[in-house]
Image (cartoon, rainbow, N blue to C red):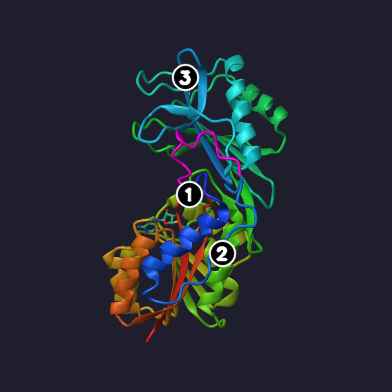
């Protein structure tokens, strides 16, 4: 196995240089150590081909004296950009598009943004590719909405890459480390791409969360649906629903879905996704999941199953205690952090739930991150 030449500079892949089978063993062991006390941990679902799985590729742009334009990732714990030409985990087409944008900049006299002086235009480029549909979205993150000769730039880029289906300018005037600003200006195509997961179509906008590993996401969702054991009559919650993926996939197997998500652009995508897939037994709420669950618990809403997929920090007390009040027969927990998962499982098991099954899924080969699906049943 060839070791990535940026290994010591780019902080992206902590397991670079470790054989893939060994990586899976390390992750299996970690999950067993953390969660083995709750139930038997199934064998981790790995990838047949663990390379180039990331459907979202992004690069920071800058200028280095003597080197010229650089584009890539920030060196760990610094603001120096490592110029990246190849990457083992990113989608290869998206990576080439970024390199070609890099090479086009001088002839269009577009300067990368300089964080210290605040001058220059291009801050980041983000490319997302629908692995099933082949649709490609390029997001040019810029420091000001004025992009001279943008139409010619897009024309030149599309000449090199006719597979690009939409180009968006994202205006980011922030001084923190967030890649995207809030304002999007579509300069070509519809401003989103469509992809497919588990037989459903999904619209993805620049700011919405979308799982980066499409191949493994189908395994993840498939496991979650299997663990839920739905009969068709259930009222379910899809909490932290993003663009509505889990709820829309589950809608075929239950009576009603209630989805809750904080990010407004994700909720707007989710609504479009439901109508795109002709799903009518689902409703979407833009809210903090914890506050929303408190309200449902106060209303004494009848809920059969809760799907929850919180961010790395896990779920807060408001959410957790409301689940207990709602008393669903089953909870299916999808977690991207086994440490916070453990804390949340401790709470559930102290309040009358039992962990039935634990399935790790390798969503992030070469990195230490571990995703798990866990099912819990009310005793
Ligand atoms: N289930 C989705 C998204 C999972 S990522 C999928 O599989 O694609 C976690 C999601 O939680 C993100 O979309 C994020 O915007 C959302 N989120 C983060 N904090 C939240 C909160 N307090 N309340 C509701 N949603 C939240």
**Residue topped by disc 2:** 45
Q: Earlier in the sequence, mark 2 or mark 3?
A: 2
For discs 2 and 3, the disc positioned in front in the rendered view: 2
Q: Nearer the viewer, residue 187 or 210?
A: 210
Provide the residue span drawn in magenta.
1-15
Residue sitting at x 53%, y 54%: 211
Q: Secondary structure beneath disc 1? A: loop
Whole-Å distance between the Cαs marked 1 and 2?
A: 15 Å
> x and y percent of residue 64 in the render?
46, 18
Mark nearer the N terminus (3 vs 1): 3
SS at badge 2? loop
Residue located 45% across and 54% down the image: 369
Q: Quadrant of the N terminus?
A: top right
**Residue 263 x, y percent position in the rendering:** 42, 52
- In the picture, residue 107 is in which quadrant? top right
Residue under pointer 3 = 63
Query: 107 above or below 268?
Result: above
């Amino acid at each position: 196995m060839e070791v990535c030449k940026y290994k010591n500079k780019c902080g992206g892949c902590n397991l670079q240089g470790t054989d893939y089978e060994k990586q899976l063993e390390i992750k299996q062991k970690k999950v067993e150590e953390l969660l083995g006390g709750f139930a038997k941990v199934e064998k981790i679902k790995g990838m047949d081909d663990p390379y180039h799985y990331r459907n979202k590729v992004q690069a920071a742009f800058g200028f280095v004296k003597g080197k010229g334009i650089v584009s890539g990732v920030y060196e760990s714990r610094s603001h120096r950009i490592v110029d990246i030409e190849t990457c083992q985990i990113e989608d290869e087409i998206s990576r080439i598009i970024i390199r070609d944008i890099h090479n086009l900049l001088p002839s269009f006299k577009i300067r990368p943004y300089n964080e210290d002086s605040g001058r220059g235009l291009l801050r980041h480029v983000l490319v997302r590719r629908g692995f099933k549909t082949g649709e490609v979205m390029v997001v040019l993150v810029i420091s000001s909405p004025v992009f001279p000769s943008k139409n010619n730039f897009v024309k030149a880029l599309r000449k090199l890459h006719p597979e690009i289906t939409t180009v968006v300018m994202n205006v980011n005037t922030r001084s923190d480390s967030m890649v995207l600003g809030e304002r999007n200006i579509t300069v070509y195509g519809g401003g989103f791409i469509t992809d497919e997961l588990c037989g459903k179509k999904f619209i993805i906008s620049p700011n919405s969360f979308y799982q980066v590993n499409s191949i493994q996401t189908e395994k993840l969702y498939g496991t979650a649906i299997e663990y839920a054991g739905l009969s068709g009559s259930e009222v379910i919650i899809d909490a932290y629903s993003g663009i509505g993926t889990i709820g829309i996939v589950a809608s075929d197997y239950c009576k009603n879905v209630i989805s809750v998500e904080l990010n407004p652009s994700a909720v707007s995508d989710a609504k479009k996704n439901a109508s795109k897939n002709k799903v009518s037994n689902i409703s979407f709420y833009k809210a903090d999941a914890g506050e929303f669950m408190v309200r449902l618990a106060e209303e004494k809403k009848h809920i059969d199953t809760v799907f929850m997929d919180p961010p790395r920090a896990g779920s807060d007390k408001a959410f957790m205690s409301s689940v207990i009040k709602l008393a669903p027969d089953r909870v299916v927990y999808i977690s991207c952090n086994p440490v916070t998962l453990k804390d949340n499982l401790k709470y559930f098991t102290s309040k009358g739930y039992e962990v039935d099954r634990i399935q790790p899924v390798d969503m992030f080969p070469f990195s230490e991150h571990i995703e798990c699906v866990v099912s819990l049943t009310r005793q």
